[in-house]
Amino acid sequence: MKHCVKAEAVHDHTARRNANVRLNLKIMAQIDFSDRHVISNVFRIAVPMLVAQTFNLLYNIVDRIFIGRIPGIGTTALGAVGLCFPLIMIITAFTNLFGSGGSPLFSIELGKKETEEAHLLMCTSFTMILLTAVVLFTAGEIFARPVLRLIGAESPDTLRISVLYFRIYLLGTIFQMTTVGMNPFVNAQGFPGIGMRSVVIGAVTNTILDPVFIFGLKMGVEGAAIATVISQILSSVSVITFLCGKKAPLKLRVLSPRELFASGKRILDIVSLGISSFVFQATNSLVSVACNHMLLITGGQIYISVMTIISSVRQLLDTPVLAFADGASPLISYNYGAKSKELVEKTIRTVSVTGMIYTALVWGLISLFPAFFISIFSSDKELLAYAVPALHVYFFAFVFQSLQYCGQTVFKALGKRRQAIFFSLLRKVVIVLPLTLLLPRIPGLGTTGVFMAEPVSNVIGGTACFLTMRMILKKELAEMNEHAF
């Protein structure tokens, strides 16, 4: 009897092991993260992600393009919607807390061939995203008006427009968080094309519906928000359909209360890694509020519209370098888990060089053609006159931003929680926020001082982050070598 039980246990263990092997082969059938063609693999992931992130921008940027052209109230409406950005960033921050926190751990476990643990990490992240979305929606609907008034919606028209837009936008919270939060898990399983498709579906829908609702049905800002919600629903349906369907190697599901309670350590691990992305977005929101406050004091309401345009240009131009970094992240995590020193180092080198080249080119284009970038969002000549010099100042030293992105990507990919959090706080809270409040008070600077805070932080924060990353990486790779023998 004992021999029968033992034989059955061995058989079960062998079956589980073989199932794991087949599952891993299935995962790697799309993109083999252990393949030595690093540059090719990074591009195979990054290009679909670039397309996806570019289209993802369309959700809000297309809104701004059309809102800025509403007859009679375009500039005012653009500023009012711009006041919603800090609150939208908070929603994104909570999304990243679980999406960006869970996906690197997920990839590391796949590299270790621990597919069961990887699966639980993905399902835990998803369950936490759903719970958080419900809380954020409820809080937003209750406190939208007083919070928007607090952060700069002073005139009745501005307050009315911003509250209207944000409350409708909140209806899509659970769908937006699902799409953004779960797409990294689609990419980490080797299916970046699926992730791209889900975002493109929503963005194209938004681009079509915006002019129909805003101008055709004369719904104005309300129409822009409704179009965004419909688009977010379609994107989330695409993501969930894939992750719950036959093609996904690891199937998505919501954890039961008992399973969620048992996943306490996983939640802590996810949150402790995702907190750096959360801090990055949350501090962006804080800095945005501070910028709007100082711009109102030193330049007036029109500078809120100027900052809205500059933030939009920044998002547009950040997208390629962020997509490339995000594309490299699962490769770094997987090969770190697999203890492949050469592939980790080569991937990081590729990200560093590509990011520096791209940001240098962007810096040059902004210097030469600032009016072109501004005209994408507004044809108001008065607004253009204010925005051109502000854009020049804000994007000065943009190349140093690539150092920050590279360093942060590596910290998260390797599971270095403390460093990722520290450098998120350093650049925004320690450098940008104080400078935003202090520089405009220097005689002669005024609004220029608000826009100067960003390039100063890029130079100091970006350089410090990158150099620290290189020192830690050198130590990690040396230890990896020791374990290999």
Image (cartoon, grey):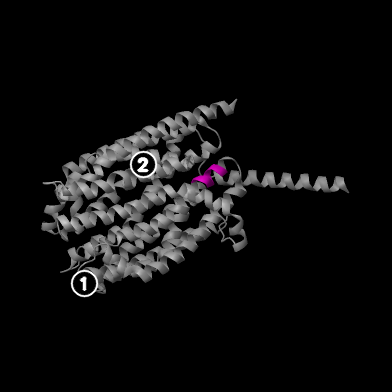
Q: Which mark is residue 198?
A: none
> Is residue 181 left or right of 436 when viewed as pictured?
right
Q: Earlier in the sequence, mark 2 or mark 1?
A: 1
Look at the picture and state if 198 lies above or below 7: below
Look at the picture and state if 119 lies above or below 69: above
What's the magenta region? 104-109
Q: What kind of element bears circle 2?
A: helix
> What residue type is disc 2 on?
Tyr
Is residue 358 visible to the viewer in this orientation of the structure?
A: no
Is residue 472 visible to the viewer in this orientation of the structure?
A: yes
Say which residue label 2 marks: 405
- Please say whether residue 105 is one of the residues in the magenta stretch: yes
Point 31% across, 36% down: residue: 356
Q: What kind of element bears circle 1?
A: helix
Query: Residue 376 location in percent, x, y?
Result: 21, 55
Q: Residues within 10 Å of mark 2 (few under 14, many from 20)?
A: many
Q: Which dot, 2 or 1, sits closer to the camera?
A: 1
Image quadrant in which the C terminus is located: top right
Q: Residues within 10 Å of mark 1 (few under 14, many from 20)?
A: few
Q: Nearer the viewer, residue 228 or 300?
A: 300
Point 24% across, 63% down: residue: 152
Query: Residue 174 location in percent, x, y?
Result: 44, 64
Point 24% across, 40% down: residue: 456
The chief SS type of the magenta part is: helix
Q: Which mark is residue 156?
A: 1
- Please say whether residue 43 is one of the residues in the magenta stretch: no
Point 24% across, 54% down: residue: 291
**Between marks 2 and 1, how big is the CA–CA gap?**
39 Å
Label 2 with label 1: CB-CB less than 8 Å:
no
Q: Nearer the viewer, residue 12 or 75?
A: 75
> Is residue 205 left or right of 310 when viewed as pictured?
right
> What residue type is disc 1 on?
Pro
